[in-house]
Image (spheres, rainbow, N blue to C red):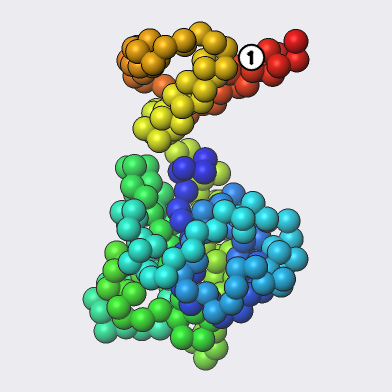
Amino acid sequence: MKNYQPVILLKDTQIPENLGFTARSMLNCGLEKLRVINPKFSLNDEKIIPLSAGATKVIKNIKLYDSVAKSIADINFLVACTARKRTLTKIVQNPKESIDEIFRKINENNKVGILFGAEQSGLTNDDLSLCNRILTIETNPKFKSINLSHSVIIVCYEWLRKIKIKKINKKHTLASKEELNFFYDSLENLIKLSGFIKTKERRENILLKIKNIFSRIDLDKNEIDILFGIMKSLFNANNSK
């Protein structure tokens, strides 16, 4: 499910504890993709991990950016979470409406991001100009302030509820060229160690034929992982003799 979920983006986060709480909230709801833009503290801050309560897999895989533009370069559909009324004309949705649309967009093979601003200042109009929709969480009109991590878990919980009801129509995604090239390099090293390739000319010819064979099969990532497992097993068995 990891490839079929929205990306959570935090911009200008001021309090390290909130990053820990956010990671915890995300993993509670099965979300793992977290991007951080210009945090006002080090990602090695000692306050983050304890408050993530075991969600270290989210923390360790954080992607760090220095601008919103760079952080959303591969995003197709962006939702901004904000409580303040703006002059920009945007469709405003509550969490359920927003997640319903996010689910549809992901089902259509789009990469979706949900952007949260700083604790005190939120998002700027420049940020919102990059977004397709605005997500607003209804609160007491006389007291609208919500903690950042609380906002995140409300949105993430709506995602969890949605996927419990609806299933993602997963497509057969092939292994990337990067994954295939890594596989070819690993296989080449294993063949070298076996002594099968004895001359440079033969090596080039054999490797060309190997790539041609596997490129015709349309391998997916799971199949690549299986082949890596077989290669590792053969390597370990040969070394144990």
SS of the residue under disc 1: helix
- Residue 122 on image: x %, y %: 45, 81
Disc 1 marks which amino acid?
Answer: Leu
Q: Position of residue 90 (x, y in %)?
A: 27, 72
Q: Which residue sits furthest left?
A: 89
Residue at left offset 43%, top offset 62%: 114
Q: Does the rendering let one see residue 226? A: no
Residue drawn 56% across the image and 74% down it:
148
207, 183: nearer the viewer: 207
Q: Position of residue 55 (x, y in %)?
A: 68, 56
Q: Residue at x 66, y 60 (%)?
A: 24
Identify whether 124 is placed above or below 115.
Answer: below
Classify residue 60 as left or right of residue 214: right
76 displayed left or right of 6: left
Q: Is 99 or 33 nearer to us in this picture?
A: 33
Q: Quadrant of residue 83?
A: bottom left
Q: Residue at x 41, y 22 (%)?
A: 219
Position of 68 relative to 239 (above/below): below
Q: Nearer the viewer, residue 212 or 190?
A: 190
- Above or below, 17 against 33 in this view is below
Q: Quadrant of the C terminus?
A: top right
Quadrant of res 207: top left
Residue 66 at least partly seen:
yes
Q: In the rendered image, which residue does mark 1 sit on?
A: 234
Q: Percent from the top left, x then y, of residue 37?
A: 46, 70
